[in-house]
Amino acid sequence: MDASLPHTRGVRDSKARFCDCGLKIAGTDSHQVCSSCLGLEHAQEGIDDPDSCGHCAHLTIKSLHRRLA
C-alpha cells in the first residue's frame, strides 16, 4: 500500500456513528441501522433499484456494493 495515498477509513471527522448492535454506520449513510442489521436482501435491492429506498438512493454505487461484503 502506498503511504502517500490518503487514508479513508476511520477518519476522525467522518461523522460515523454506531448502530444499536455496535457496528459503525458511515457518516454518509442516513439509514438508522447498519448494513448488517438491514440484511443482505436490502443491500441487494439497493443495488438493483437504488430508488426503492430513499437512503440508498443517496449512496454511491461503490458504497452500495460495499454493503454486500
Image (cartoon, grey):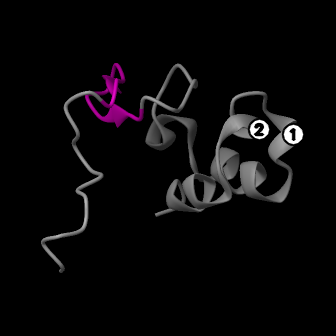
Instruction: Determine whether label 1 and label 2 are within 8 Å by CB.
Output: yes
At numbered mark 1, what does the secondary structure look like: helix, strand or loop? helix
Q: Residue at x 77, y 38 (%)?
A: 57
What residue would you read off at disc 2? Answer: 57
Q: Residue at x 41, y 35 (%)?
A: 26
- What segment carries the magenta color? 14-26
What residue would you read off at disc 1? Answer: 51
25 on left or right of 23: right
At numbered mark 2, what does the secondary structure look like: helix, strand or loop? helix
Which quadrant of the figure has residue 25?
Answer: top left
Residue 64 against residue 19 in the figure, above or below: below
Q: Position of residue 60 (x, y in %)?
A: 65, 50
**Label 1 or label 2, whichever comes before in sequence order:** 1
Neighbourhood count class around disc 2 (C-alpha, 10 Å): few under 14, some 14–19, many 20 upward:
some
18 on left or right of 39: left
Q: Residue at x 30, y 52 (%)?
A: 8
What main secondary structure does the magenta stretch of the protein show?
Answer: loop
Residue 21 against residue 38 in the figure, above or below: above
